[in-house]
Amino acid sequence: MENVISDSVEQASDRERREAHSHVRSWTLSRVTELLAGVLVSGAVFFYLQFSTDAILDVDGYYHIRWSRLLWEGLRAGQFPPAFPWLPLTTLNPQDYVDHHLLFHILQIPFTWFADIRLGAKVAAAVFGTLAVASCYWLILRYRIKYSFVWLVALLACAAPFLYRMSMARAQSVSIIFMVAGIYFLFERRYWLLAPLAFLYVWTYSLFVMLCAAAVIWAGVMLWTERRIEWRPVVWTALGTIAGFLINPYFPDNVRLFTAHLLMKAKPTEFTTSVGMEWYPYESWYLLGSCFIAFVAMIAGYVAYDSTDKERARRPLFFLVFSTILLIMTARSRRFVEYWPPFAVLFAAFSMQPLLEGVRRSVASRLPSDMLDELQPFLDHHERPEVAARNRRRENWQTVMATGVALILAAVMIVNVHETSKEIAGDQPPDAYRGGMEWIRLNVPAGARVFNTDWDDFPKMFFYDTTHAYVSGLDPTYLLNANPELSNLYVEITLGRNNYDAGPVIRDRFGAHYVFGDKEEIHDNFYFKALDSGWFEKVYEDDYCAVLRIRDEKGTPSTDNEGEATTPDAGAEVEDGADNMDEGSEENVPDAETQQP
């Protein structure tokens, strides 16, 4: 009799184990399916936005993809990293150049194998943006937060500027992936993995400091919840960061550049030179309106956060501190608007998780959070009928409410995508400077330096012509740090504030005999003063740019129409030359030692 009972118990136990394994497999398959669906939805959004224009979104993207191509050519030629002689007057001169996006540029290399690297840059931006959102969504799936698809829609609806900046052909999307990976390692207490992650992050983007901040925040969370000093995440992250600086092809110049950049950008409202708009704050009402869902998520997170159960409060508390810091940084500079909104949504998701799951209502709520996470798929299997019925009614109401919230979020997402698409479509066309740079490439001696009237014109000039050097680019502080006097002179001349002839000064102080100017109104004073001075001759002009040659001696003032006869036809000659720029792009590269002032 005892044997029969024993066999029956064993059979029941085996059956329960098989059911448990089957449930786990079913849950895993469901989550994988959800993740793939999330990738497809995110990809559809970012590819739609990306191809709202033919241009590479954000002018810096032209530099990034061209430099990635040159890195690839350097690797094939056995020169790594290759020299950078294109901004000899700045801190990015050939002796001191630092690629602080090195790993990002390496990640872009496969996309430079496209026949049209402009298209490659756009595909790369869409792929990286998709993966950034998918990584945040994966974190929600990994920690089994209910109504995951609602949170996916919230991520895509959180802020229009977030969608815009995630569509840029820049490193911020990859940066979010690093942040999410670091947060996962913190949550799982796999602290040693923070070292290689920090190492790679340093090689990828200068915002690796956020990973260091996350480690410190987590250490503080552990001190509050467990009353002990958790030093390992801080130490491992610090070791990886230090190694990333020391084991680096640009050491020690990378340390110098990062320090100078950090000190310069620490007070964005106190710049002594004009910098990119991303370093200045948004207007308050625009920030509130464009990031409304992110603000709602923050409020929901603050309200739902419960500190009574310290063990389960660890993850929500981390996101509370982390997202609040990002919010403050975004209020100071729009530069961080691509980081705060998604982490605001994650803060809301993790804070509301106990409410959505009802874990406070049962004996199970006294279990450790890690154990409860593992047991969650099996709880409620043997509830009394009346309890099960009550729970089903509650689940049904939650599902109805979640569906309503999802529909509202979907409407906001559609509006944000539509408005962002219109903004992207209004970007400057990709061929805007192509004609002017092709004229320079064909008519100006290779290796000569060209005076560009705006530092942010450099990326597109560099994209179309790597056979000449330029005066200022990528960031105006690079010229300011290298030579403050020359930087102030540059600003004075390009804004037309000079009361002297600019021609001889540009030639003698900047070492340039040709000037490339865009058609932005801010440079009109320079342009007309230059033509009236008698020192400049207009040799090329189209709707987007003009090229001026500095005469050897002062002559008769040029008229605004002079030089149009030398403008090449917009068709055959320009197209033929530009299509071959990838071939032999290392030939006629400006000599690193020539034309130093």
Image (cartoon, grey):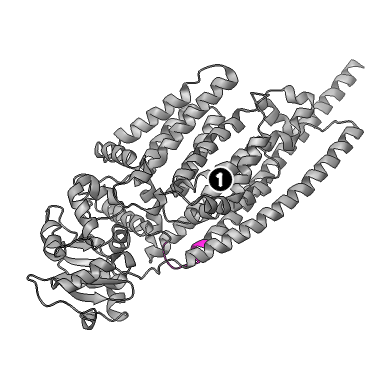
Query: Which x, y percent locates residue 229?
Result: 50, 18
In this view of the protein, which residue sits in the foreground, 271 or 69?
A: 271
The residue at the far left in this view is 553
Prevailing secondary structure of the magenta residues: loop
Query: Which x, y percent locates residue 5?
Result: 89, 20
Taking the image as shown, residue 501 lies to the left or right of residue 171, namely left
Question: Residue at left 87%, top 35%?
Answer: 388
Question: Residue at left 52%, top 35%?
Answer: 322
Above/below status of 283 relative to 551 = above
Q: Is residue 587 visible?
A: no
Q: Quadrant of the N terminus?
A: top right
Which span of residues is magenta-colored? 48-56
The residue at the far bottom in this view is 565
Taking the image as shown, residue 554 lies to the left or right of residue 411, namely left
Above/below status of 277 relative to 439 = above
Identify the image quadrant of residue 586.
bottom left
Q: Is residue 100 visible?
A: yes
Q: Secondary structure at mark 1?
A: helix
In this view of the protein, which residue sits in the foreground, 234 or 280?
A: 280
- Confirm whether the magenta stretch covers residue 53: yes
**Which residue matches tag 1?**
342
- Confirm whether the magenta stretch covers residue 105: no
- Amino acid identity at mark 1: Pro
